[in-house]
Image: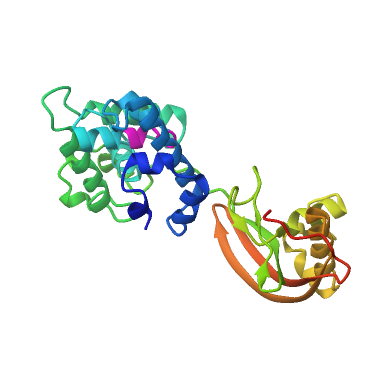
Amino acid sequence: RFLHTFPTVSDLAAADEQEVLTLWSGLGYYRRARQLHAAAKMVVQEFGGTFPTQFDDVLSLPGVGRYTAGAITSFAYDMPSPILEANTIRLFSRLMGLELESTTSAAQKELWAFAESLLPRRGGGAAAINQAVMELGSLVCKPAQPECSSCSVSKFCVAYRQGTQLRLPVLKKKVPTEARVHGLVVVARQGKYLMRRNGDGKWWQGLWDFPRVDITELLAVSVGTRSINGRPAANASKLLETESQESSLVEAALNSDLDLECKITQRLLVLRHAVTRYKISLHCFEASLSAGQSKPLGAD
């Protein structure tokens, strides 16, 4: 439906951001949709509606980094642009015997230089080489069980010679996940539901959602610390449940945030999902407008 609605870069560039975000639903992080939209505008305004062919021009587009620019110019135009991604990082690190953590600037400098050294400077063939090293990394130089005995370049591999292939590449330590508790409130009146557009810097920026509050943050603010009675604030919703405080906490925050008079009537369910490094428990409530509430519910 996205491609049907925006068959050309000009169609996408001329679209309203809200329509782009709506049609992007289910296609991944919404930040990508915003960047794609901004890139389409730039292609139309600065490149006459034709996608650029030069590496620096492609790299200038919003959302395009060095890897993406190299992949596009290499595969689309067979330009000698190096590519560095998970499979080639693993392959090159083992071939070089690189003992540096692979995401550091020093390691990246060596990896990019190695990738570039493999490419012909003229006469084409860069696309085939880039595809080959990506496939070699994916199918042969595997993370846990590299097939060194059948690898066509094992005789050049420092890690294979030293027996360190299972230890390389040196990976960055994983960022620990953080538990969060959010409260979402459904307010209905005469068959219509209250929704609001998330503001800048908020969760799911620019998207329409039922009103929600970050219970973890509310708890941290209410007690002036990140823990309650020695327990992490992120887990304190269990404490609140036992003390029947969760509904009143969410209700007070909702009314203050929206300048309404709502009363939570019940908790509907708890949903759990992950966003980047956050594990979110979403506590969903139903609420009604107080009888004395006269303020109309606007679009926002």
The answer to whether residue 299 of the structure is visible from this angle is yes
- Measured from the top left, where is residue 223 in percent x and y? 87, 54
| Vertical relation: 285 (above or below) 3 | below
Q: Is residue 259 left or right of residue 196?
A: right
Q: Nearer the viewer, residue 271 or 254?
A: 254
**Residue placed at 56% from the left, 60% from the top?**
274
The answer to whether residue 156 of the structure is visible from this angle is no
Q: Nearer the viewer, residue 139 or 41?
A: 41
Q: Residue furthest left?
A: 123
- Measured from the top left, where is residue 160 in percent x and y? 26, 43
| Vertical relation: 78 (above or below) 149 | above
Q: Nearer the viewer, residue 279 or 40?
A: 40
| Vertical relation: 193 (above or below) 253 | below
| Vertical relation: 75 (above or below) 269 | above
- Measured from the top left, where is residue 17 in percent x and y? 50, 45
Quarter of the rendering containing residue 165:
top left
Q: Is residue 165 left or right of residue 75?
A: right
Q: Quadrant of the N terminus?
A: bottom left
Magenta stretch bounds: 62-69
Q: Is residue 213 left or right of residue 276?
A: right
